[in-house]
């Protein structure tokens, strides 16, 4: 016999737990929900950073906030003031603890850890059946946050790969009032490499080597360069590594996730949860969670991520095309963007909260020629695809 729920959430990570937390506001209207999570326990496996209004009350403990950030390229640096939207750092462990406490308060939500979804859910007579390692469950609605089994090559225009160490130094080597958002390394024809440094005290920082490139990179491919970067930053101080984190995020998904049915939503990082040109996903997922929770409480139906407005989608495509075709110019392009546009506009653009004026400010700040070439190239490619499609259909008809 299958257990029956109103809603099954496949995967209890950022999106699955975010949705569970957002449901708390709906009290008794919260559907009877099961969250199926394959991990046995949560660990401090990642750090979420984002720009947020400092007056906004957040449900989690924020580990650190920076009001100043630096972007550097080719020996030049620009310091940017975040104004009323400092850069926030949320430790994974604090997010998971807040989510677990919220689930504990909600009688309608059950989290089943150490349980895997074995196959694709099946649909019959208005009901989904989900086969899990702890037996099968049925529900009228499914929210699927599972990433694809393997990172699919070609599934994204670019990949953001990063590997970082949180270190504790014997000597005071960091300035905890300012973070290095992007410190570009020497131009590389394969990808755009930069260092991201989040100092939380004079002796402790998370240091990440990040690359934007056509190929996703694993820890082993990034580790020797990360070692060299850390050695240079600590300048001979003894240090110990507290923990490490690695990620591969899509930048510009090639295929939009297929909608199986209005009662089934695919969401999360590989389903439109990430801002294409930056990979920032946390706040986007959080906004989606609130929208989805309202829809579930009102109509019993989940919602997927909302697509970005068309002008923003086009800008993202052009931006990613420039980085893909001119990786050696990546550092100069970002430096120009941060150096010439107002920080508040760039922050809104990067976070996906920008309006038309912010997009214009960003366009005006970047070098014109590669962007026009990329736009023309994309238009030419779109025209070719249309022509090939119409030739194909003529041949099929013939
Ligand atoms: C190290 C790291 C740092 C990041 N830093 C930032 C940041 O600073 N700012 C930002 O905006 N974004 C950041 N991101 C991007 C994004 O916010 C995260 O990837 C976020 O966790 C995505 O949420 P998700 O729910 O899509 O995926 P996840 O959080 O990975 O959740 C998916 C869940 O599904 C579970 N699962 C998978 N398969 C199954 C199965 N078959 N059965 C049951 N459960 C399953 C997994 O165990 C996991 O818990 C970072 C990502 C990483 C990896």
Image: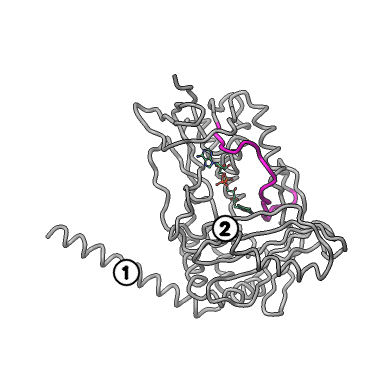
- 224 left or right of 134? right
- Alpha carbon separation for disc pair 2 and 1: 28 Å
> Are there few (<14), some (14-19), or many (20+) residues within 10 Å of tag 2?
many
Q: What percent of the width, then of the height, locates residue 249?
A: 55, 56
* Residue range of the region highlighted in magenta in the rendering: 35-55
Residue 166 to residue 388: above or below: above
Q: Quadrant of residue 218?
A: bottom right
- Secondary structure of the residue carrying tag 1 is helix
Q: Is residue 268 magenta?
A: no
The residue lying toward the viewer, choosing from 187 and 142, is: 187
Q: Which mark is residue 156?
A: none
Give above or below for 341 relative to 244.
below
> For the point 66% across and 40% down, which residue is it?
42
Tag shown at residue 383:
1
Q: Is residue 48 magenta?
A: yes
The tag earlier along the polypeptide, 2 or 1, is 2
- State the image coordinates of residue 19 (x, y, percent, origin top left): 58, 38
* Disc 2 element: loop
Judged by depth in the image, the label closer to the viewer, 2 or 1, is 2
Q: Quadrant of residue 51?
A: bottom right
Residue occupying the point 58% across, 71% down: 192
Q: Quadrant of the C terminus?
A: bottom left
Main structural element of the magenta stretch: helix, strand or loop?
loop
Quadrant of the drawing holding the N terminus: top left
Asked if labels 1 and 2 touch by Cβ distance under 8 angstroms, the answer is: no
- Give the farthest residue toward the top: 1
Which residue in the structure is indicated by mark 2?
279
Q: How many marks?
A: 2
Judge: label 2 CB < 8 Å from ligand 1: yes
């Amino acid at each position: 016999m299958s257990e029956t729920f109103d809603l099954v959430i496949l995967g209890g990570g950022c999106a699955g737990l975010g949705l569970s937390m957002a449901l708390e506001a709906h009290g008794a209207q919260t559907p009877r929900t099961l969250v199926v999570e394959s991990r046995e326990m949560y660990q401090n496996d990642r750090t979420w950073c984002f720009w947020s209004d400092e007056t906004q009350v957040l449900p989690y403990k924020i580990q650190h906030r920076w009001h100043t950030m630096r972007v550097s390229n080719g020996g030049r640096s620009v310091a940017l003031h975040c104004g009323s939207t400092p850069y926030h750092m949320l430790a994974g462990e604090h997010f998971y603890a807040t989510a677990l406490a919220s689930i504990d308060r909600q009688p309608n939500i059950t989290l089943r850890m150490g349980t895997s979804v074995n196959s694709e859910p099946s649909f019959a007579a208005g009901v989904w059946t989900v086969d899990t390692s702890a037996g099968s469950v049925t529900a009228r609605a499914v929210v699927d946050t599972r990433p694809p089994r393997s990172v699919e090559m070609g599934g994204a225009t670019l990949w953001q790969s990063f590997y970082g160490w949180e270190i504790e130094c014997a000597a005071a080597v960091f300035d905890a009032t300012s973070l290095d958002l992007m410190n570009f390394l020497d131009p590389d024809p394969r990808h755009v490499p930069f260092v991201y440094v989040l100092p939380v005290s004079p002796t402790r920082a998370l240091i990440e080597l990040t690359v934007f490139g056509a190929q996703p990179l694993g820890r082993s491919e990034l580790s020797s360069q990360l070692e060299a970067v850390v050695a240079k930053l600590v300048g001979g101080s003894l240090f110990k590594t507290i923990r490490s984190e690695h990620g591969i995020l899509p930048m510009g998904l090639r295929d939009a996730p297929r909608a199986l049915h209005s009662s089934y939503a695919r969401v999360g990082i590989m389903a439109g949860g990430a801002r294409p040109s930056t990979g920032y996903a946390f706040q986007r997922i959080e906004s989606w969670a609130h929208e989805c929770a309202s829809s579930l409480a009102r109509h019993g139906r989940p919602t997927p991520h909302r697509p970005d407005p068309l002008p923003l989608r086009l800008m993202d495509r052009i931006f990613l095309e420039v980085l893909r075709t001119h990786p050696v110019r990546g550092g100069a392009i970002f430096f120009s963007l941060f150096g010439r546009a107002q920080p508040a506009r760039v922050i809104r653009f990067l976070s996906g909260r920008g309006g038309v004026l912010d997009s214009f400010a960003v366009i005006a700040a970047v070098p014109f020629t590669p962007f026009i070439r990329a736009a023309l190239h994309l238009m030419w490619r779109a025209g070719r695809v249309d022509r090939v499609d119409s030739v194909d259909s003529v041949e099929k008809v013939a």
